[in-house]
């Protein structure tokens, strides 16, 4: 996927995940209607083997589409669009040839309806421009075929009429699907822009809050270590070599806290919020997490929070490693969670689907008691 592809799957992977069952449902409807229509055309078939071959092709198309749009194999590529539309058109053409010369009317042929139904959900996965272009090409094919078939039909009319009757369902349903996807995409973009604007407005307040937290951490450290040390010196009124070593240890602890606060980024804060305390879980020497996109940050933060909520999660085992590999930031998230692998896979599958929508190389490895998620981002 490229950054220029504005699709619901790219901008709202979780929402598209919930809409995935529409694909298989449409496939079942298409195949069922094709079978019904073929049976009602038995007395009009001039080449029955082609009719059965057309059914096999459209059934294979529905199966491929259902499999290829599964969240675990996201994103749906341009090649997937070409395969789905191309095979649908091939199936429609085969059926048209199977009734050529014996067909009475084209209104009850299933070819153009099957293609049109396929276009309902395609805009969820591919840019509107690509879907409209594919719909126009498909409509031209079925329309031209209908126009050429016209002289053998019962109702005699101009070829343009047959062309319009066959092409209109394809164009109409494709445009309807594109309109829905465009509205969904626009709303998602506006929501993201509003969220960014809110973040900018809240930045001064967040900085002030962070400053208070840092001050509190330092005060706590001084109250627990430095104050008792100085009180002890005042009471004893003497300085020993042990006191000097203790002073050095306290100073080192204060410096360590200060360095940790400087190095602490959004990912460290996300981990701290998820597990309830600061933890050295993040291993990011190159500070590559700061270049992570908003989509990646959102999904990664949600994944960490989901892991922390599972009963049996060991916070000390959480580890997030980010390193540069072949020009991309490779991220590995691992943790020990005391539940079976099947339950872990069921829990993290939606997050994997969301990650695959923005990082096609995302993988999920679950074993009894542990889970590992890996993905990469950035330009190669």
Image (cartoon, grey):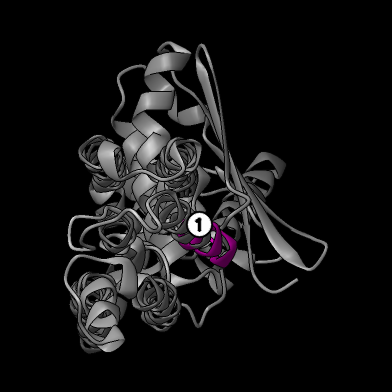
| Residue 132 drawn in magenta | no
Q: In the rendered image, which quarter contains the C terminus? A: bottom right
Measuring from the top left, give residue 9's x and y in whole percent. Answer: 37, 62
Q: Position of residue 338 (x, y in %)?
A: 43, 13
**Which residue is drawn at the image coordinates 52% and 78% (left, top)?**
3
Numbered range of the magenta stretch: 75-85
* Badge 1: residue crowd in 10 Å (few <14, some 14–19, many ≥20): many
> How many numbered tags mark residues here?
1
Q: Is residue 234 visible?
A: no
Q: Residue 77 lies in magenta, yes or no? A: yes
Can you see residue 39? Answer: yes
> Is residue 63 positioned above or below 259 on the image?
above
Report the front residue among 224 and 165: 165
What residue is drawn where x is 46% and y is 55%? 97
Query: Helix, strand, or loop for circle 1?
Result: helix
Question: What secondary structure characterizes most of the magenta part?
Answer: helix
Above/below status of 271 relative to 162: above
Residue nearer the viewer, 7 or 141:
141
Q: Nearer the viewer, residue 85 or 19?
A: 85
Q: Residue furthest right?
A: 326
What residue did someone put label 1 on?
90
Q: Position of residue 357 (x, y in %)?
A: 46, 57
| Observer-nearest of 88 and 95 | 95
153 shown above or below 225: below
| Residue 62 occupies quadrant | top left
**Quadrant of residue 295 within the rendered picture:** bottom left
The residue that appears at 32% across and 67% down in the rendered structure is 152
Left/right of residue 353 with respect to residue 108 in the rendered view:
right
């Amino acid at each position: 996927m490229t950054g220029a592809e504005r699709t619901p799957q790219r901008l709202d992977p979780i929402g598209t995940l919930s809409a995935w069952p529409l694909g298989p449902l449409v496939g079942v409807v298409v195949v069922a209607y094709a079978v019904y229509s073929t049976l009602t055309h038995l007395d009009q078939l001039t080449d029955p083997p082609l009719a059965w071959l057309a059914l096999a092709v459209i059934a294979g198309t529905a199966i491929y589409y259902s499999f290829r749009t599964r969240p675990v194999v996201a994103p749906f590529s341009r090649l997937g669009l070409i395969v789905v539309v191309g095979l649908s058109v091939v199936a429609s053409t085969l059926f048209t040839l199977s009734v050529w010369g014996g067909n009475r009317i084209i209104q009850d042929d299933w070819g153009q309806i099957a293609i049109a139904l396929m276009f309902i959900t395609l805009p969820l996965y591919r840019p509107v421009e690509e879907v409209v272009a594919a719909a126009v090409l498909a409509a031209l094919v079925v329309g031209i075929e209908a126009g050429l078939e016209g002289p053998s039909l019962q109702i005699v009319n101009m070829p343009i009429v047959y062309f319009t009757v066959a092409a209109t369902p394809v164009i109409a349903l494709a445009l309807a699907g594109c309109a829905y996807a465009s509205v969904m995409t626009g709303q998602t973009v506006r929501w993201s822009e509003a969220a960014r604007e809110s973040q900018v407005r809240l930045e001064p307040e967040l900085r002030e809050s962070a400053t208070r937290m840092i001050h509190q951490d330092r005060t706590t450290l001084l109250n627990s270590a430095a104050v008792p040390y100085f009180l002890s010196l005042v009471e004893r009124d003497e300085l020993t070599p042990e006191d000097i070593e203790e002073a050095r240890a306290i100073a080192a602890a204060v410096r360590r806290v200060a360095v940790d606060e400087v190095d602490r980024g959004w990912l460290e804060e996300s981990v701290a919020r998820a597990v309830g305390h600061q933890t050295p879980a993040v291993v990011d020497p190159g500070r590559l997490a700061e270049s992570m996109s908003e989509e990646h940050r959102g999904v990664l933060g949600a994944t960490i929070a989901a892991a922390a909520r599972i009963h049996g999660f060991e916070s000390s085992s959480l580890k997030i490693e980010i390193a540069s590999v072949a020009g991309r930031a490779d991220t590995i998230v691992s943790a020990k969670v005391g539940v079976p692998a099947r339950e872990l896979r069921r829990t993290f599958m939606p997050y994997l689907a969301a990650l695959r929508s923005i990082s096609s190389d995302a993988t999920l490895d679950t074993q009894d008691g542990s889970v590992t998620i890996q993905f990469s981002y950035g330009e190669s």
